[in-house]
Image (cartoon, rainbow, N blue to C red):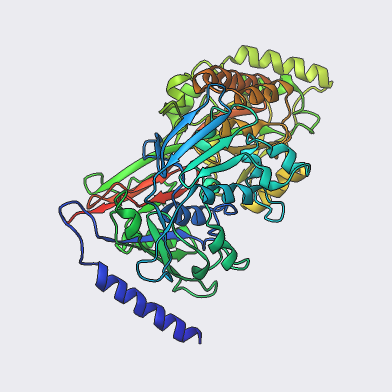
Amino acid sequence: MKRVKIIFLIIIILITTLTFGCTRNESDGSGYLFNCSLLGNPQNLDPQMASDASSFTIIKNMYSGLLKLDGDGVLINDIAKSYDISSDGLKYTFELWDNYYWYSKDFEENEEIKVTAKDFVFAFQRIFNPEMHSPHNKDFICLKNATSIIDGDMSYTSIGVTAVSDFRLVIELDHPNANFLTLLTTPPAIPCNEKFFNSTRGRYGLDKDSVISNGSFYLTEWFYDQYGSENILIMRRNSFNSEVDKVYPAVLKFSIDKDYDSQLKSFNDDKSDYLLTEIYPDKFDEKDYVIKEYESSTLGITFNLDDEVYSNENIRKAFALSINREDLQSNLKRNDISVASAIVPPSTTLLNKSYRELVAEEYLNEYNENKALKFLEDGMEELEINSLDTVKILISENMINSDYMHFFTQRWQQLFGVYIGFETVPQKEYEKKLRDGEYQIAISEITGSYNSVFSVLSNFSSENNTFGYSSAETDILLSLAEKTSSLSECVDIFRDIEKQINSDSFFIPIFYKKKYLIYRKTNADIEYNPFSDHIDFQKAKYFDD
């Protein structure tokens, strides 16, 4: 039976390739069949439940929400034709386009089901339905009645999202949230058609027959065998919605790969149209390739605050003040990381700019070895010790090349007289050691779940981190930022949050970690979101050499 399925799948692929591979409109780059790659099988194509990068890539190409971010991180309308925000920042009224449609491969010819405001209401109710166990309900805690619903005091149907008419949607908040519009670009805010959802009988998002599209593409094939190698997912252009906002590719053909090496080989063999990598792309000539660079995460030193020595603030300040970032940058031989002085990475946008353009980072971390030695002396005196014991820095595999760490840890050894080694472990073991407190110093990677300064900094909320950091001052500032209606006002608050975390000397930013999207110059306009790790193909084009 399995052999029959594989043969059938190969026939489907051949037909798809023959049908669409040569139907390109060469004047505008449309009509191309893009060969794509997913690292691992999508776990769930239900937008209100999904949490992995492979799922996000398919979801963002299959669905449309109220708003979206363009390739530069600028907020633009999607299904929302326009919107209005009340003067108190508590009421958002959206006027929707009336020509977006749901579509499935099983729909009858000319069957038309419009996307309406009720689909958004049902989606938000699902997020807060306790039977759904959505992992995203606290992301939307600002919605009216959200806290009471989560606490079990109100029904999930009381969430503050209302369909005034088919194409007018009202969303009410309990408190202003300057970040709310950006939240609406994330997968959980995608609409859900209640009738179709109920027809799947609990299978929604789990197989090709249990999904429906309201975006650029719809799903036609999804075959995955964890023991096989012919795993594939195929999407075709949603012609209904392409009339509203043009979709350029005709087909997306995804191979489902098990590891990065397989993806690299496919790209080198010209079997894939793009490559995502964290490895510096010096082997790819910029004459032939488009190379886009993103800095969306920050690597830094964190301390176990339950450890007797490193719970001491003076000891931590000694480490923080003794990092010469200028010298560190001059010693880097490759370009896959850059030196960081602040927590929020440069690819994070605010007010349609990089946040780092709004808040300069060079004054956030001081370098002063004399002060460092004084803090060390004071700390050891408080601890009644004469020296620091040997310590190993915990690192997850593939997080960073430990050679980069030697540039500043060797100086620590010379300055403080302490031997510093490294313990590099697989990711799951790394996470367990963090949870169990089986470390003294670790390298932590900080990023946002979406492109938001607040999302990055909320990693340091007392209730939202796995590394034991707790600061009343930081929590107050985060709460203030969450309830401020103006993004401009948030800039100063975010600056203060970074300063507060730095003053606690708990997280010492060291490097910004880079990601690269690479594709051949015969292609254009493939877009990547480095926070959710999804690729957007709606405007992707192909031109002959």
Q: Residue at x 58, y 26 (%)?
A: 411
Q: What x and y, as percent, mark residue 90?
A: 58, 28
The one of 360 and 18 positioned closer to us in this rendering: 18
Q: Is residue 169 left or right of residue 378?
A: left
- Asked which quadrant contains residue 111, the reply is bottom left
Q: What x and y, as percent, mark residue 422?
A: 63, 42
Does residue 425 appear anywhere in the picture?
no
- Asked which quadrant contains residue 230, the reply is bottom left
Q: Residue at x 40, y 78 (%)?
A: 9
Residue 14, compared with residue 64, is above or below; it is below
Residue placed farthest to the right in the image?
A: 384
Q: Residue at x 46, y 24 (%)?
A: 356
Q: Residue at x 43, y 65 (%)?
A: 104
Does residue 91 appear anywhere in the picture?
yes
The one of 208 and 228 positioned closer to us in this rendering: 208
The one of 204 and 491 positioned closer to us in this rendering: 204
Residue placed farthest to the front in the image?
A: 165
Q: What x and y, as percent, mark residue 360?
A: 47, 18
Residue 120, compared with residue 498, is above or below; it is below
Q: Quadrant of the C terminus?
A: bottom left
